Amino acid sequence: MATIPADPFDFTFDPGTLALVVIDMQRDFIEPGGFGASLGNDVSLLQAIVPTVRQLLDGFRAAGLPIIHTRECHRPDLSDCPPAKRLRGAPSLRIGDAGPMGRVLIAGAPGADIIPELAPLPGEIVLDKPGKGAFHATDLAAILTRCGIRQMVFAGVTTEVCVQTTMREANDRGYECLIATDATESYFPDFKEAAIRMITAQGGIVGWAAPTAAIVEALD
Ligand code: C5J
């Protein structure tokens, strides 16, 4: 067993059952001209965590531990995109519309790709998900069972939407989850802070939180 100093208390893990889950580090959320920007968000906030997410990837790769990358995206015919999701709000580009990086949040379009700096390596799992949570309408549960994963470190975007939703789904399924505080970000910094407080409050009601350096050091 190994230990990461964490909030609200130490996160003890078995390296044989730990995985890294990197949520939605896609061009559509991180780069200008994508879905995030079409909603009026400042994507430079999210770009700031690319180096720390890369440190986590490097640490898990060096330790030989499993890595799962998720991508929020939909089928080209939008059959897995509820109209309520597509029509919500007043973005300049809706899901499925043609944008500067191809059709917005559509599997196979350049915008749905993970940014090149964090590109998955052969052997790493890439999971396309139509919802905010990575368990909804995916085979994530089966993958975790098959790989013997019981504990997960979470990174990616956005903290209070897809990261927190997936952590809550995982927590309800009995997984132990830790969020890397400097490898996750929101378009709304106060939402990020609030989400991490929600996760760790009440004795870690959803999970644990720790900085990337502490996580990577514990993997050595
Ligand atoms: C959002 C996500 N915010 N990956 N997606 O729509 O958090």
Image (cartoon, rainbow, N blue to C red):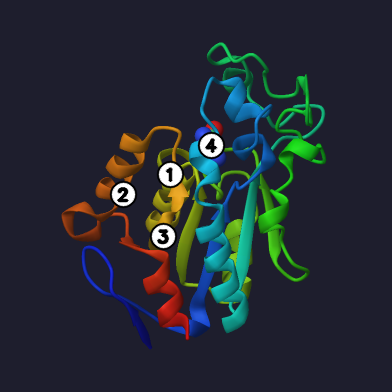
**Which residue is at the front of the view, 25 or 70?**
25
- As measured in the structure, the alpha-carbon distance from the residue carrying label 4 to the one carrying label 2 is 21 Å
Which of the two residues, 41 or 84, is positioned nearer the viewer here?
A: 41
Q: Which mark is residue 159?
A: 1
Residue under numbered circle 2: 196
Q: Is the CB–ligand 1 distance for label 4 below 8 Å?
A: no
Q: Is residue 35 left or right of residue 166?
A: right
Q: Residue at x 24, y 59 (%)?
A: 204
CB under 8 Å between callouts 4 and 2? Answer: no
Quadrant location of residue 123? bottom right
Give the spatial CA distance, label 2 vs label 1. 8 Å
Q: Give the Cα distance between marks 2 and 3.
A: 10 Å
Residue wearing tag 4: 44
Q: Is residue 132 visible?
A: no
What residue is rendered at 53% in x and 14% in y?
89
Amino acid type of the residue that numbered disc 1 sits on in the rendered structure: Thr
Q: Check disc 3 and report the residue beneath it.
A: 180
Instruction: Tell me if residue 143 comes above or below residue 112 in the rendering.
Output: below
Helix, strand or loop at label 3? It is strand
Q: Determine which of the numbered discs, if any, sits on residue 47 in the image.
A: none
Earlier along the polypeptide chain: callout 3 or callout 4?
4
Hey, which quadrant is residue 175 in on the image? bottom left
Under circle 1, the secondary element is helix
Q: Residues within 10 Å of mark 2 (few under 14, many from 20)?
A: many
Report if the CB atoms under discs 3 and 1 are less than 8 Å apart. Answer: no
At label 4, the amino acid type is: Ser
- Closer-to-camera residue (105/92): 92
Displayed quadrant of residue 195: top left
Mark 2 or mark 3, which has the lower sequence index? 3
- Residue visible at 63% across and 57% down? 69
